Image (cartoon, coloured by chain):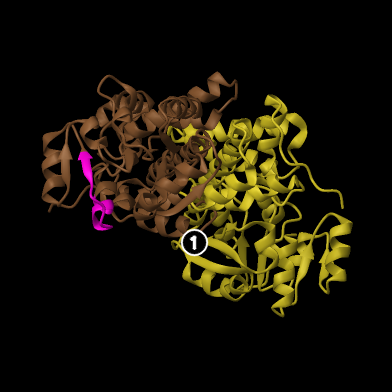
Chain colours: A yellow, B brown
Amino acid sequence: MGMGTAQSLLKAGFDVVGCEINPEGRARFEAAGGRATASPVEAAEGATALVVMVVNAAQTDAVLFGDEGAAKALPAGAVIISSVTMAPDDARALGSKAAALGVRYLDAPMSGGAGRAATGQLTIMGSGSPESFAAARPVLSAIAEKVYELGDEPGMGASFKIVNQLLAGVHIAAACEAIAFASKLGLDLEQVYKVIAASAGNSWMFENRVPHILAGDYQPLSAVDIFTKDLGIVTGIGQKEKFPLTIASSALQMFIATAAAGMGRDDDSSVARLLAMITGIELPTAKPD
Amino acid sequence: MGMGTAQSLLKAGFDVVGCEINPEGRARFEAAGGRATASPVEAAEGATALVVMVVNAAQTDAVLFGDEGAAKALPAGAVIISSVTMAPDDARALGSKAAALGVRYLDAPMSGGAGRAATGQLTIMGSGSPESFAAARPVLSAIAEKVYELGDEPGMGASFKIVNQLLAGVHIAAACEAIAFASKLGLDLEQVYKVIAASAGNSWMFENRVPHILAGDYQPLSAVDIFTKDLGIVTGIGQKEKFPLTIASSALQMFIATAAAGMGRDDDSSVARLLAMITGIELPTAKPD
């Protein structure tokens, strides 16, 4: 279950069934007023929309079209809202499987992270038939601040998300590299943050992630492993399509190295900690509670 | 001469002597109401502030402290405002030479490009003695929107600029990589610009440079060769200080490749054209006048 999204839907007045294999997650969602189940089929029964937030295309395929898959249990007219970052070819293949069952399917990857999911302020990069958009719109309005309608077939949404993740991943790794290097140069990192955020070197990710480094707080809002996965998808497409992605590949290697050093489940700003570990520079440490 | 800066000073009412070896540049500045010379010594005589905008630290050293250098010709109390992007060690060395002559020296690299120079909206990352700042402030106010005072010795300004250029260079190369890849994925590039500029993948450079690609206009506002130089300085410091700069090095290689393909003097968004040349993707072409 995407907990933030499920809670945003609850707040908007939807009758929400959260599907989650982890019993603690189910208990948390029930405590928040929702219904919970461990069965995708149970979640699908009677639903007008099924939001899929799992890890990758293979899991999406399994929960929708596997032996215990949800797609067959959906009522007529219901729509699948597929939110996982995946290769456009995978989004197209899943869309075709849904079409073969007569089920509406929206390719609808999301951007904004857990924070914006909880406040209903995600950005959605959607593509699918007009009927799929029409069926999905009430749900999308409740969870997203911005909904882009990018084409009438699955695959376009996934492609836009891929381009976004290429940049997001590079910008996070570059922000970490720059801040660690600034420490090496002896600069005041709070001042670096303030000056760069107001200068041509700024990025959305620099502004968003560097405060984690300044606070010494690497509890995962978005984990390193998300970007080893997402930049892996990006560079995998590059390899398949024979398109050189020099910068994205370098950023991927930095995330892989950070995961290799044991920080895969920590915040993605941990690339800065990797550089501190390698070079011996000092970064801020968390204040005791 | 930094033409934009010189014109901003004229507009602010300063008596400005522009020093320029190119006769056309001198003629342009005279036509704009300024005085012009080819001699650094002549520019320095009687000046209360000397803004140095050349290519690198070696040129700064030559125009200030060479046989025909300007520093010795400056009146008592005048300040040198050194604006070139250079390694912090070079900024410190130049500051020491100025101090040995009893001349005030401000380490004051600038950010914002030719466009913001012409409108007096640069960002200045300055460091130097309180006396140097006091002497320089009237000039800085006329050419910059933001003046950061980052320390009381030369070197700190240069260090901040280096960190900014690391990020700026990476973000330009990444923006070009992402837009070229989006073309490979068959996306509408105008739509990609709009969606990414409003998403977590955005950067100051993405917003600023991608319009050049969309317009097919590679006339240099800031040239590829600026970033082969600036990222060369960044990675050179990394090598000297033994600090790995994986992402910055990759970006540098993309700028070097673009320069190698004959586009060194074109706009730095030409990295996208390099990728188009390599992969055969299509990018927008300039509309005929």
The 10 Å Cα crowd at callout 1, few under 14, some 14 to 19, many 20 or more, is many
- On whether residue B14 falls in the magenta region, the answer is yes
**Residue A131 visible here:** yes
Magenta segment? B7-18
Position of residue B279 in the picture relative to residue A195 (left or right): left
In the foreground, A45 or A135: A135
Q: Which residue is mark 1?
A: A127
Asked if A65 appears above or below A58 in the picture, the reply is: below
Residue A145 percent location from the top left of the image: 57, 69
Amino acid, disc 1? Ser
Residue A288 percent location from the top left of the image: 86, 49
Residue B86 percent location from the top left of the image: 43, 30
Asked if B127 appears above or below B59 in the picture, the reply is: below
In the foreground, A41 or A33: A33
Q: Residue at x 86, y 64 (%)?
A: A28
Q: Residue at x 69, y 48 (%)?
A: A212
Position of residue A166 in the picture relative to residue B94 (left or right): right
Q: Residue furthest front?
A: B76
In the foreground, A48 or A114: A114
**Residue B284 visible here:** no
